[in-house]
Image (tube, grey):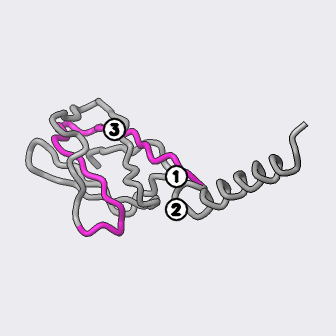
Amino acid sequence: MATLSTRLRAGLALAVMVATTALTPGLASAEDRRVRIINETSHIIVRFYASNVGATSWEEDILGQDVLRPGQSVVVNVDDGSGYCLYDFKAVFDDGDSLVRQRVDVCKISSYRYTED
């Protein structure tokens, strides 16, 4: 049987862990920020950026050396540790065109489609 002192220490450690988790942004209600990017256009996506709405510039190209061909998709984790759910997306296509979509809620969607509408 655990002594009162041992139980108090265990309870205190649990309380500290719960309080720390509640005060850490994005941890207490950790949302899944993975999004499947789907290319339903006739052009190759050569660069893709996702930056939280509080950022002043685009983050690095998520695709890196890869490209996203027509009909292909890729799952990206846009979580930058900021706790934001709203992100701006920018896709750059092989013909030089780019498409920016603002305020995409990555906590509520699991996929995002680029189409030629």
How many residues crowd mark 2 within 10 Å: few (<14), some (14–19), many (20+)? some
Mark 1 — residue? 108
**32 is within the stretch colored magenta:** yes
Mark closer to the chain start, 2 or 1 = 2
Left or right: residue 107 compared with residue 53: right
**Up-down relation of residue 44 to residue 19 (above or below):** above
**55 is within the stretch colored magenta:** yes
Residue type at the position of mark 3: Ile
Left or right: residue 2 compared with residue 97: right
Mark closer to the chain start, 1 or 3 = 3
Which label sits in the foreground, 1 or 3? 1
Mark 3 — residue? 38
Kind of element beneath mark 2 = loop
Asked whether the beta carbons under mark 2 and mark 3 sit within 8 Å of each other, the answer is no
Kind of element beneath mark 1 = loop
Mark closer to the chain start, 2 or 3 = 2
Which label sits in the foreground, 2 or 1? 2
Q: Which residue is drawn at 36% across and 66% down?
A: 53
Kind of element beneath mark 3 = strand
Name of the residue lying farthest toward the right? 1
- In this view, the residue in front, 114 or 1, is 1
Q: Residue at x 30, y 45 (%)?
A: 114
Q: Residue at x 41, y 60 (%)?
A: 82
Which label sits in the foreground, 2 or 3? 2
**Up-down relation of residue 57 to residue 115 (above or below):** below
Residue type at the position of mark 1: Lys
Q: Which residue is drawn at 83% across and 51% down?
A: 5
**Magenta residues (range):** 29-56
Q: Quadrant of residue 41?
A: top left
- In this view, the residue in front, 15 or 69, is 15
Mark 2 — residue? 25
